[in-house]
Amino acid sequence: MNWFVTIGGIAYNFVIIIVCSIYIFMKRRRERNHEEDFLFGGKKMGWFACAASLALATLGGGHINGLSAQSWVSGVASNFFCLGAGFFFIIVCRYTGVWYRRMGCSSVADLFGKMFHPALIPIIAGFGVGHSWMVLCVEVQGMGAVISSMTGIPNLVGGLIGAAIGLLYIIIAGIEEVGLVNAVNAVLMYVFGIILLIFIGYNSFIGGWQPINDNLLLQNPELIHAMGNPVILRTYVIGAFVATALGMVFVQGDVQAAAAVPNVKVLRKACIAAIPLNVMFGVIIISLGLASRSLVNMNMLDAANGADGVVKLILTYMPNWLQIGVIGMFLSAMLSTFACMCLAVATMLNRNILNYFPAFKNMPAKKENALSRLWILVAGVSSAFAAVTIQTQTNAALTWGMAWFIPMFFVFVIGMKWKRSRVGTLATLIICWVFNMVLTFTPLAEKIGFDGNTYSVFMLVLSLVLGITFTALDKNAVPNYRQVYDAQRGKYDAIAGADTN
């Protein structure tokens, strides 16, 4: 147990959050007539803050606990989870996010409501709230596991501590706070991550990276092959890549920052930094996971799995100051996802669900900000208590969750490039979602030889076939949205701001 390092890692995040919040309040005091926009920050987010927010929103338990554990199973091939995230940033910053801004949308549900039919707004928003809450549970579970493994306290206590810091990450100043804290953490995460890899290379007790590599070549050669082996390729690589590349595109928490930038030009610029900020951090985590596996093989470390092994590697062989920095880095990655998902819950409840009730329609900013903080508190606290009873494999849970959004990607592309079928879109989404539940609760995938992390593959094929078929059969389909935009470009550009090409 190491309370000193745990407290140091928590203090690391606490100090960054408080300092950034003070800076924001001082900045606001200098600005006359400032009106707080909790959810979107007045759409003034800069390109690096946007890049950091996009990158860190998709980091978290899926990387810290998920990839470190997955590295023991699929090794270097786990990088396909990271590579898929890289494609996700290209799609969002260069395509879907551009339309998100052009159409002046406040949420993913709003985008589909404008493209197809307003009836889709509460359906997609309700679905999105449930998914965001699931991710919150996974992130709290991850923070609880890290804190508990270091101190011996129960997971619930560790999760509550993590959730409390996560709420502080966002509750003070909303998206402005998230953007600034993420920008600072994005830099520090790489500083400590690179230093950690260097320290392993020159650690006299470990002997550097050479014996780690030699041991893996001897005992687990499939773990250092780019594609793993046929089983890893079939059960993990393809599914993970498709899930992260296409499944995250319409996850509200992952794209919240896209609606907070002033124009499309800023969003496109953010893509340049978002890709390395996210992808290379995953590479660092996988490297640590493989190092811990090798040390276990050499009887130099006692660990039950990759996530446990990475924490024990740091606590056993690194100096205290680096331990604090790295544990703080791990917690900040999960905290950022926690904060963005809380913000997503507030956005969808306020803008897409409560908006149907007269008392909440077109709320003044002050009332919406108060409600946003309330929803964030409810979502954060409830997920902390639920997380300890929902024990999951982090990577599998998150890729399963992403698979639900893949049908939305394909009906969006069909509606943007070909034509829009309102009935066909709804039918495609419902059938795909029902089939995903069938795969979840029956052994169907295993019986036909597609067991493992293959939900996203099923969703890709089914949504593409159904989307094209239903749209072709619909005699009442309307022109694609690109035509609508071109015909009324001036109006849309006025809504979305300048530089929308």
Image (cartoon, rainbow, N blue to C red):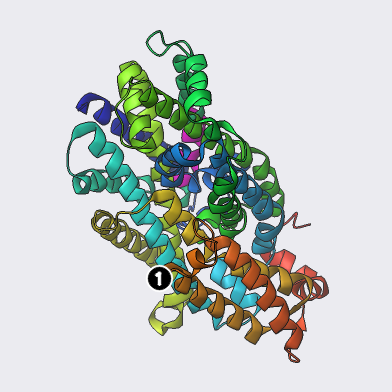
Residue that lies at the very extreme toward the left in this rendered image: 153
The one nearer the camera, 53 or 452, is 452
Reading the image, the residue beneath label 1 is: 441
Residue at image position (69%, 83%) is: 470
SS for tag 1? Answer: helix
Q: Is residue 227 left or right of residue 11?
A: right
* Whole-percent x, y for residue 291 in the image: 45, 25
The answer to if 179 sits in the magenta stretch is yes
The reply, left or right, for residue 331 in relation to residue 95 is: left
Residue range in magenta is 177-188
Magenta: predominant secondary structure element?
Answer: helix
Quadrant housing residue 424: bottom right
State the image coordinates of residue 162 (x, y, percent, origin top left).
29, 44
User: In which quadrant will I find the C terminus?
Assistant: bottom right
Is disc 1 surrounded by few (<14), some (14 to 19) or many (20+) residues within 10 Å?
few
Relative depth, front residue between 157 and 445: 445
Residue at the farthest bottom position: 475
Measuring from the top left, give residue 376's x and y in whole percent: 34, 59
Indicate yes or no whether the magenta region holds residue 339. no
Say whether residue 119 is visible. Answer: yes
The residue nearer to you, when weighing 449 against 484, is: 449
Quadrant in the picture for the N terminus: top left
Residue drawn at (27%, 60%), measured in percent from left and top?
Answer: 382
Looking at the image, is 183 positioned above or below residue 241?
above
The amino acid on which the numbered mark 1 sits, given as a three-letter code, is: Phe
Q: Position of residue 183 (x, y in %)?
A: 51, 37
- Can residue 45 be seen in the rendering of this structure? no
